[in-house]
Amino acid sequence: DQQVKQNSPSLSVQEGRISILNCDYTNSMFDYFLWYKKYPAEGPTFLISISSIKDKNEDGRFTVFLNKSAKHLSLHIVPSQPGDSAVYFCAASLGSSNTGKLIFGQGTTLQVKP
Amino acid sequence: EAGVAQSPRYKIIEKRQSVAFWCNPISGHATLYWYQQILGQGPKLLIQFQNNGVVDDSQLPKDRFSAERLKGVDSTLKIQPAKLEDSAVYLCASSKGAWGEKLFFGSGTQLSVL
């Protein structure tokens, strides 16, 4: 039962353009969403998060959008840089109503070409 | 601030052997997590500790996996006996609070079971 899904295993964009990574979830009780970035041979690092009471959160070049009715979130990276090439995981949490454990998607590998 | 430390980085064993992983979380972090990441999948929570008590071990294969967190600091994860399907990266993470809202991950242990 895959509660968090990233249907695109990979994405390739040109440097300077926008990267859009997508994530869908099935549990309407999720109330907190996060994006993590992972480089080879390293653990995932936190990138950006959004609470279910918001529909947008911005941090520099990174913006996360949440569409609760569609159970969909997306990560926009503008402009994309070669150093952004990594695997991106979205994760969802039940927050205070549960142990708060994160459920991760399968990941999307982003390649930004110079 | 020191990050989450894990050892060893790599481990190769034969099936039916036993193996142990060690994790030292960020100082002051009350919550510690062990995740299993199989190639091509997102991290899956195995066990979550709050201080030295278990909060969630619903996805831990208890017939072969065990974990402990002595004195609410370091933790060890053990597999005995190992199976081929246990080949994965084992990630340790920690967070300040009881929720998984922002986890800090170690670099992981790459386990290969032959």
Image (cartoon, coloured by chain):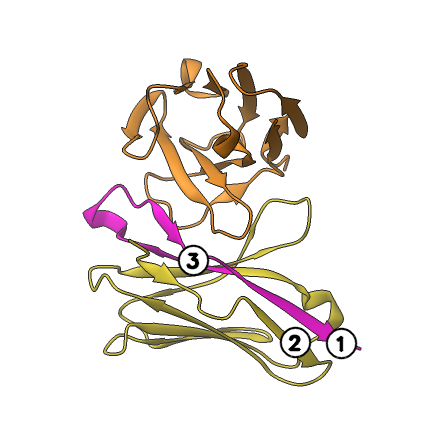
Chain colours: A yellow, B orange
The disc placed on residue A113 is 1
Can residue A70 be seen in this snapshot?
Answer: yes
**Disc 1 secondary structure class:** strand
The residue depicted at 28 percent of the width and 67 percent of the height is A52
Q: Are marks 2 and 1 in contact (CB under 8 Å)?
A: yes
Kindly identify the residue that appears in the image at 54 percent across and 20 percent down.
Answer: B15
Q: Earlier in the sequence, mark 3 or mark 2?
A: 2
Q: Classify residue A68 as left or right of residue B31.
A: left
Give me the chain letter of mark 2: A
Instruction: Give x and y (percent) for residue B29.
Output: 45, 33
- Residue that label 2 marks: A12
Mark 1 touches mark 3? (CB < 8 Å):
no
Please name the amino acid that badge 1 sits on: Lys
Magenta residue span = A89-114
In reply to whether residue A92 is colored magenta, the answer given is yes
Q: Is residue B61 above or below residue A38?
A: above
Q: Chain of mark 3?
A: A
Label 3, label 2: how far apart the Cα atoms are: 19 Å
